Amino acid sequence: MKITVIGAQKSGMAAALLAKKIGNDVFMTESGSIEAFKDNIRILANAGIGYEFGGNTNKGLINAGLIITSPGVPPSAKIIRNAEARNIPIISELEFAFRHLNNPIIAITGTNGKTTTTALTSHILNNSGRKAVAAGNIGTPLSSLVGNISDDTIIVAEVSSYQLDRADTFRPDVAMILNISPDHLSYHGSMDEYISAKWKITSKQSDKNLLILNGDDKAIPGGHQRIAEQQADNQQTIKYATDARMALFSASPVDWGIYIEGDKDDNKIIISDKQQKEELMSLSELSLPGIHNAYNSMAAALAARAFEITNEDIRDSLMSFAGVEHRLEFVRTIDGVDYINDSKATNVNATWYALRSYKKPIIWLAGGRSDSNDYSFLRSAVEANVKSIVAIGEEADNIFNHFCLSKRCHKANTLEDAVMHAKDEAEAGEIVLFTPSCKSFDMFMNFEHRGNAFKEIVNSIG
């Protein structure tokens, strides 16, 4: 079969190499320039894969039996529309890899917390003696795992709405939706389409599979009820439904799942299976700060329980987990001031959790490229926790104008200028928190590039 892969980034390359490895005629098409992909071109040439760079022509559509599209290639892209017009099947790299894997899979999606929960779940499993690998959007495409891990290795996959949107048969043993808030709407077109893409994580699950949902997130279908929406047609078609068993994580008691119980000074994490309740641990024993990390930890615990990991192993793992890079990552203490890198906070929802994670006064560094950000969502967190704000990037004016009447605000031309201004303003016992609330693409290649730049600046301070 001729398979055309759209996009020569990490997942696209992994899909192309796998497709070639299993005997297909493969063609790669990439809109980016040849200069930006010199190393990838050498790999493609050595593998005998045809390619084009600098634009997506119809060359890859001629006689193609399948299209594999990379995350982020929008449905409106001309090559996608042309492929659809020719009735060529289009799938994501996630779907393609799934068709060639025999491993147990835990799949994790949500607007925020995916990377932390993926790493945390993998940590629990490995720490408890099971073989597990974190993959997907966390850095390792699933296609690169095919043939390279044993079938008993549990794949813990961070999956995005982009990947799920083009997944037709994907059926994880355990699926997880952490939360849903407006994000990537320019790709999906509407909030309803975004939710529908997320819900595809469970659409092919059976009653032998488990679906883990945030019981407190009203945007998640089924979080409060088994069926969230029925279309008003003659057949009463169920729009959001699942055949999977369901477990909830919540800050309030649930019949089946995990929740927080007790007062603010003595909160316990309780596991419930309707017939029995077990205390897992105290909330204060979690290694990661913030209520959002309590949610992430509870979700990871439920996934681990599905693989018969003991409460003791889960508790020990939740106490020892060190976190992930660029997500509330402690960088350094300078003159009694803690510097925290939260570059992965690319939307206001992630920043809300970050601002709520600390009791110390915060000098908040924010800004970048907006995705229709509504900063009013942050007002209560800013009023309660933020001492002052330093804004950068394309959103600097909007952030400044939104908060300048209630908080001391400053605009900086560069990230380095922002850090140095924060250093001059911060006092011992306070926090400089870089949680941008925006995409990175106005000034950086991605959030990792941005986070590394922040750390380099902080670590260069004498």
Image (spheres, helix red, strand yellow):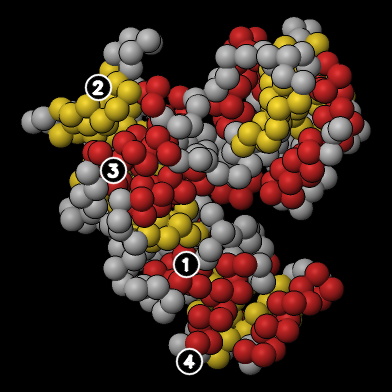
Alpha carbon separation for disc pair 4 and 3: 43 Å
Point 67% across, 84% down: residue: 44
Q: Looking at the image, is mark 4 or mark 3 earlier in the sequence?
A: 4
Residue type, numbered disc 2: Pro
Label 1 neighbour load within 10 Å: few <14, some 14-19, many 20+: many
Q: Residues within 10 Å of mark 4 (few under 14, many from 20)?
A: few
Which labelled disc corresponds to residue 253? Answer: 2
**How many angstroms separate mark 1 from mark 2 (CA)?**
36 Å
- Residue type, mark 4 in image: Gly
Give the label, 2 or 3, closer to the camera. 3
Kindly check if marks 2 and 3 are in contact, taking CB atoms under 8 A apart as contact.
no
Q: For the residue marked with disc 3, what is the amino acid?
A: Asp
Question: The C terminus lies in which quarter of the figure?
Answer: top right
Query: Secondary structure beneath disc 2?
Result: loop
Toward which corner of the image does residue 450 lie, by quadrant?
Answer: top right
Q: Find disc 4 in the rendering and name its residue.
A: 23
Q: CA distance from mark 2 to mark 4?
A: 52 Å
Q: Which mark is residue 313?
A: 3
- Which of discs 4 and 3 lies nearer the camera? The answer is 3
On the image, the x and y values in percent for residue 99 come to: 37, 73
At x 40%, y 73%, the residue is 149
- Label 2 vs label 3: CA separation? 23 Å
Residue 224 in sight here: no
Judge by depth and name the residue closer to the eye, 101 or 226: 101
- Residue farthest to the left, as pictured: 275
- Helix, strand or loop at label 1? It is helix
According to the picture, the residue beneath numbered tag 1 turns out to be: 142
